Amino acid sequence: MKLYPLHIKNTRFDVAIADTDETQQKGLSGVSRLGVHKGMLFIFQEPIRVQMVMRNMNFGLDFIFLSPDWKIIQLGSLQKDDENGIVSEYDCTMVLEVSLGTIQNLDLNIGDQLEPIEELNIQTEGVRQFKTGGTFEMVGQKIYRVKVDDVIPDKNRLQILNDNGEVVANIDPGITIFSREHTQEIIDRFKKGDTKDLGKFIIQVLDKHDAQKQEYVEN
């Protein structure tokens, strides 16, 4: 499961995301232990009053309820065998689960500001925009949902894999692939409206590709 850096009072936490019914239902249930400065971030499609429960938990948790701008609006704690759970006092868009004692150790208070990386901001905004979980990317100023369809690997072609090792595309030999950085630069130049400058840049990139030595990969 992918982890995203999130800073709480200058302390880095690495958090997994729960943004679907399935991942939110499971949460940290059954996990043997929660590592130091690790956590799980629940992202909701819209602001709601939510109840967090301790289902099949092996350790206690602190709960940090958050507003859309990453400010703490409520704090709470539960032991592993607590049967009542905890209900948010206000509508919230995110809840961060961390190890029991984190709130006290970091002296967290209502109104404190968390500091996510940009990729985590994109993920939370994507869930709210598309009203579903998944993987999201930003191109220019717009967020897109990345949909991975089932692709049958072709042993005679190059495969592109996702983070889980799943094949998301088969590539023909000799095809030109623009890097993410070059693609972003092309979009930025296109938006500026200078087609002459855009054309020159694309030619420069293609010339660079043509000058590179081809590499072949087996298996």
Image (cartoon, helix red, strand yellow):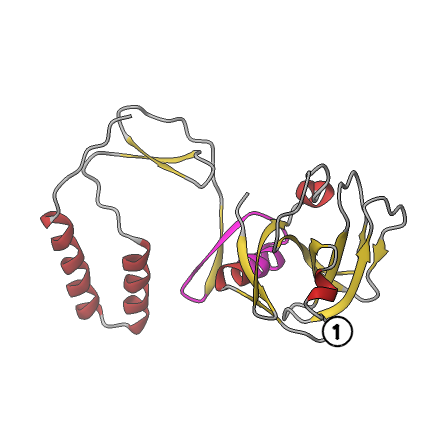
Residue at the extreme front: 105
Residue at the extreme bottom: 111
Classify 97 as above or below 169: below
Residue at the extreme top: 155
- State the extent of the magenta-drawn residues as a range: 123-141
- Occupied quadrant, residue 157: top left
Quadrant (top left/top right/bottom left/bottom right) for the N terminus? top right
Q: Is residue 65 visible?
A: no
Classify 97 as above or below 55: below
Q: Is residue 130 visible?
A: yes
| Element carrying mark 1 | loop
Classify 132 as above or below 67: above
Measuring 45% from the left and 41% from the top, which residue is drawn there? 163
- Residue 110 lies left or right of residue 181; in this view the side is right
- Occupied quadrant, residue 22: top right
Asked if residue 128 is among those painted magenta in the image, a careful observer would answer yes
- Residue 160 lies left or right of residue 81; in this view the side is left
Spot occupied by residue 25 in the image (x, y as percentages of width and height): 73, 42
Spot occupied by residue 212 in the image (x, y as percentages of width and height): 13, 47
Q: Nearer the viewer, residue 77 or 26?
A: 77
Residue picked out by circle 1? 110
Q: Nearer the viewer, residue 39 or 219?
A: 39
- Residue 162 lies left or right of residue 67; in this view the side is left
